[in-house]
Amino acid sequence: MSAQKDINVGRISGVFGVKGWLKVFSFTDPRENILSYSPWLLKKGSEARQLDVIDGSLHGKAVIALLDGVNDRDQAAGLIGWDIFITHAQLPETTEGEYYWSDLIGLKVETVEGVQLGVVDSLLETGANDVLVVQGGRERAIPFLQGQTIINIDLDAGSIIVDWDPEF
C-alpha cells in the first residue's frame, strides 16, 4: 500500500484563558482522545508546525489543550483555524477485523462478482452501523457490516470486496 498520509484529527477553534490554552474541535471518538497523540502537526495553507501537547482535558463539551511554545493568549489566537494532524504511526495497532476509517478511504470497491463500484470516498456513522460512501459511476451508500455486506478488506491490495447489488 502507498505511504500513509497524515490524519486530520481536529482543528483549533479558539483560545481559553490568557496563558496560551487552546480550544480544540476534535474529530476523535471520544473527543478527548486527541490529547493522547503528541506531537501534533498543525497545518494552515502551506504552513506547517509541529508542537508537543503539554497538557489538556475535556472542558464541558470542548477539549482544551496546552502546546509547547504557546505561552500566551496572542500566540494561541494566532493558531485559530489551524488543522491538527497526526501520523498513522501514532495510532494504536488495530486487532484482526478492526480498521481505521482513514485506512478505508481511497480503497477500490468491487462486488463478489467482480463488478467495480468505485472507491471509498468517506464513511458515515449512522448509529445502527457505519456506512461506506463509494464514488464511482454514481454514489453508493453500503452498510459496513463485516461478514454480511463487507466480505473482504485487503489493505495491501487496496481493495474491498462487497456482497452488494451493483444496481442498488
Image: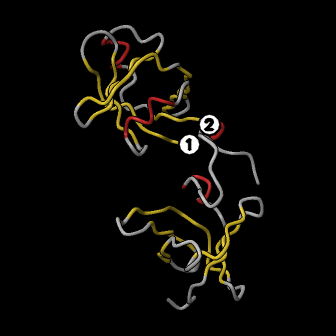
Q: Which comes before the other along the chain, label 1 or label 2? A: 1
Q: Which mark is residue 87?
A: 2
Q: Is residue 45 above or below residue 108?
A: above
Percent x, y for residue 116? Answer: 67, 80
Q: Position of residue 34 (x, y in %)?
A: 45, 34
Number of numbered discs overlaid on the protein picture = 2
What residue lies at 36% left-to-right and 66% top-to-bottom? 126
The CA distance from mark 1 to mark 2 is 6 Å
Q: Position of residue 67 (x, y in %)?
A: 44, 17
**Labels 1 and 2 touching (C-beta < 8 A):** yes
Badge 2 marks a residue whose secondary structure is loop
Residue 118 position by quadrant = bottom right
When the figure is inspected, residue 5 is found, relative to residue 155, above or below; the finding is above
Q: Depth check: give the residue in front, 57 or 44.
A: 57
Give the image quarter of residue 11.
top left
Tell me the element at label 1.
Answer: strand
Which residue is depicted at the point 62% across and 36% down? 87
Which residue is farthest front? 95
Q: Which corner quadrant of the image does residue 98 belong to?
A: bottom right
Q: Is residue 132 above or below residue 116?
A: above
Q: In the displayed structure, does residue 48 sit left or right of residue 115?
A: left
Q: How is the image coloured?
A: secondary structure
Badge 1 crowding class, 10 Å Cα cut-off, few under 14, some 14 to 19, many 20 or more, is some
Residue ID at (62%, 54%):
103
**Residue 156 appears left or right of 91:** right
Q: Which residue is mark 1?
A: 7
Classify residue 44 as left or right of residue 26: right
